[in-house]
Image (tube, coloured by chain):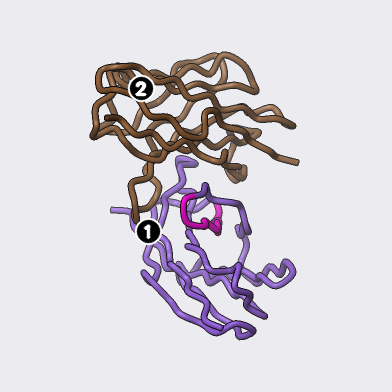
Amino acid sequence: GQNIDQPTEMTATEGAIVQINCTYQTSGFNGLFWYQQHAGEAPTFLSYNVLDGLEEKGRFSSFLSRSKGYSYLLLKELQMKDSASYLCAVMDSNYQLIWGAGTKLIIKP
Amino acid sequence: GAVVSQHPSRVICKSGTSVKIECRSLDFQATTMFWYRQFPKQSLMLMATSNEGSKATYEQGVEKDKFLINHASLTLSTLTVTSAHPEDSSFYICSASEGNRGGETQYFGPGTRLLVL
């Protein structure tokens, strides 16, 4: 079967750095997406990785290792507004998005 | 760019009535649109995928006669929940992508919160 694993919840301190991991097992791979979803709102696109390596975009970076079926989202200089759920999604060989359950990130002052 | 709107944002209806939700891509042509449902504290569940001008492809377990999807143009898709029941109460979210090849990013609408009494 196909599955995406990510931690259910993480807590971090304002101003710090946090890394949210995602491991996947899918039938084929056509890219990995990270989305941010605030409570009661729809997801917003953060990043897309299809090649191995690190993609940096401001305070957020996303890393992919296809051989390990692994990705992480790195958030630096955490702000209170970063409190949200972070969804990892993998596009499989049929170009269908397989969604993880999301990681709820709690930022404390 | 890549803005998707959804209307209405919130709807309350009586059991047995039908509700139509609109999803529009405002600044790009959406070859493919997706409809998701999300229950509280759960992940997104894909209901169906639709390509402009063709019938939607429904996920297993989603009743196509209950959830009618129309993707009549490259900027508009509608989801109609027919004969809604309380168990249909959920957060319905559409997303749109420009292509139907691999790797296109999905951009999400703001979602529609449906409450069936």
Q: Colour of chain A?
A: purple
Q: Residue at x 61, y 85 (%)?
A: A16
Measured along the vertical axis of the image, is residue B47 above or below residue B73?
A: below
Residue B22 versus residue A58 in the image, above or below = above
Residue occupying image coordinates x 41% and y 63%: A24
* Local secondary structure at mark 1: loop
Measured as percent of width and height from the top left, residue A18 is found at: 55, 80
- Does the stretch in magenta take in A34? yes
Q: What residue type is disc 2 on?
A: Val
Q: Secondary structure at mark 2?
A: strand
Q: Amino acid at mark 1?
A: Ala
| Depth order, front residue of B117/A61 | B117
Q: How far across and down, in percent of the image, does residue B23 sit? A: 56, 28
Q: Which residue is mark 2?
A: B81
Quarter where residue B109 is shown? top right
What colour do you see for chain B? brown
Crowd band around label 2 with a 10 angstrom C-alpha radius: few (<14), some (14–19), many (20+): many
**Mark 1 sits on what residue?**
A101
